[in-house]
Amino acid sequence: MADSGSERTISHWNVAKVWKGLNKPVFLTASVVIAGLLIFSLVYGRTGGEAFDALNAAITSGVGWWYVLTVTVFVVFAIYCGVSRIGNIRLGRDDETPEFSLLSWFTMLFSAGMGIGLVFYGVAEPLSHYITPPEAGGIEGGTDPAAGQAMNLTVFHWGLHAWAIYVIVGLGLAYMTFRKGRPLSIRWLLEPMIGRQRTEGWLGHLIDAVAIIGTLFGVATSLGFGVQQIMAGLEYLGWAERSNGLFLVLIGGITAIAIFSVVTGVHKGLKWLSNINMLLAAGLMLFVLFAGATLFLLQSWVQNLGGYVAALPELMLRTAPLSDDGWAAGWTIFYWGWWISWAPFVGMFIARISRGRTIREFVAGVLIAPTLIGTIWFTVFGDSGILRQREYGDMLVDGEVNADTTLFQLLETLPLGVLTSVVAMLVIVFFFVTSSDSGSLVIDVLASGGDVETPRLTRVYWALLEGVAAALLLLVGGTASLTALQTVSIATAVPFSLVMVLACAALLRAFHYEATAMPRYVSVRPVGEAAELAASGLAADAAAPGTAAAPSGPAAATATRRRRWNVSATFAGLDYPPVQEAVAAAPEPVALAVTDIPSNAIQVDPETGTVSVDEEKTPTDPLGGEVFDTPEFEASAEGQAFRVEQQLSNGEERDAAAGTPADPVVPDTGGDGGPDNGQGPRDRGEAPGTQGR
């Protein structure tokens, strides 16, 4: 045991071994492009602000309609997978149990999926929509209808649509890796459509490299904005003044915690930090709920749920082509692009922690539950901010909403304002640490070719690069550089949205085959007595000669039809040897797997009534026949099926070499058509294969 442990330590930190395990085309391409874009953002972040604004405007106006349409399609896709037969598919082997407890699983996926944004926009976004509503809504700002619309829009941006984007990537990767044994990498989402050869070629390398670039820039940008909010909170409390030194201390400290977490791994550091962070966030939310206008907030939550459901059909396809206020581009389309750019990171991380769950559990946990939690969070903080502004009018700074300070302004109006502000800053820190940790793990998995377990050295490399990128952007370019990098990150969402649409089509092919081929299990009890068989309508087949008169007339015709179609309620009357032997020999009920066959694949002989199956018309597995020499394949359901098939094949070869028939023999009928009372040749001590079929 000591040797294996030391070997693991060497493999984690040995540069030569780590370099050998990297996917060079992806790692080098992503690293070079990241360095180039960082330099570009630093140099042109200030001077080229108009260029980045133009790029952002071109993206939002040119492909905004595409984002609105595709994200709504993602919601429909996710719900369909959850409520249909597809939902029964397990993301792993059929006998596998979830890797993490329900609470730990949910806290980790929620922390990675929403993160700092919940704190940053919890008060600011509803208040912004309340003060400055969209033209397309036709509602005047600062009014009661504007308050209801503000909450509908906020929940819309952070609800089903946001999480459906993560479902597409997370569900696809979890299925391809834990069910089908593919490496945990974005490229494999398209294998059912483009095949293994193209997936492993330059197209797959390009997809993974783009995913790494978008993930790292997204995490770095979030760190920058999170540090700015912490700095604003310290300034608001009068504890510190904005300075480059304080920026470096904050980024360095947060990055150090992230590195510690990423080194300890997902089962320790990340799980602990996620649980602690969710406890802090929940405690802060409950404090605001009970220290503030409790009854008003409870009433508002119920109303917000109803308002969201009622407004969803209109909002989900709204592009506002006749409005010129830029609201849709600045909010909805920006959010969809931002979520899509985060999808490789969050989706892959959710996939990594979802092994052993069914697709229905996955959809409920990733789509429905976070949406409900989000409605509570934004109701507590958003409606509290709107109520404060409506009654006292002190939530604005120079007539506008300051996203950096609105949370602290709200907490100041409640008891223990200083303490809760500190808790809020801790929540921001932990949210970023969990985002950085999970982001580093995801990037490392991509750069390592899809290996689930990656070296700690490269995890540290990516976590450091995220912190260095955020520090350089803040120190040299300030907010302008962060905005430039954010624009670049969103730009990666344009090609990746196409990948996600193709992934939906590819996954549907694989899901439909698996749902069709998925067996239903039935329990069959052994039946050996003629009376029992007679009760099931098969007495004519089971009775010994002379013990009962042969049926005549309509009864004979009925029995003949039953025998002709070869159907049995108990399987005792079937002449298929494996079923007969299994049912006859089993002391307890036998579990049999029954698979549905498409009606167009059934062929019935009109003369004899014999049923046969046309194999060419049965569904074919778009992912079948591929074998991988990887731990992921070995541990997957596909790998398990492959090993069983090999064992059966080897057994048939051994039987053939020994001159023994591969199929089980029919239990002896006594030579006169009478029953054998469940005794096969082995039961009587005879050599197998001596009886006729």
Image: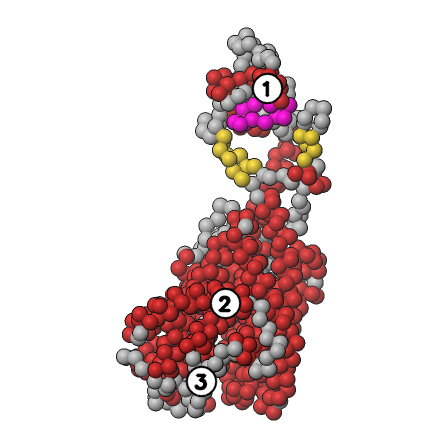
Rounded to the nearest whole Å, what is the CA distance between mark 1 and mark 3?
A: 82 Å
Pointer 1 or 3: first along the chain: 3
Residue 232 position, x and y percent, is 41, 86
Question: Which disc is residue 559 wearing?
Answer: 1
Closest to the observer: 100 or 391? Answer: 391
Q: Are marks 1 and 3 in contact (CB under 8 Å)?
A: no
Residue at image point 67% right, 46% down: 620
- What kind of secondary structure does the magenta stretch mostly adopt? loop
Residue 518 position, x and y percent, is 57, 43
Q: Which residues are magenta?
A: 562-573
Question: Which disc is residue 311 wearing?
Answer: 2
Q: Are marks 2 and 3 in contact (CB under 8 Å)?
A: no
Number of residues whose C-alpha sits closer than 10 Å to that of mark 2, classed few (under 14), some (14–19) or many (20 or more):
some
Residue 608 position, x and y percent, is 69, 24
| SS type, badge 2 | helix
Number of residues whose C-alpha sits closer than 10 Å to that of mark 3, classed few (under 14), some (14–19) or many (20 or more):
some
Q: Amino acid at mark 2?
A: Ala
Question: Which disc is residue 543 wearing?
Answer: none
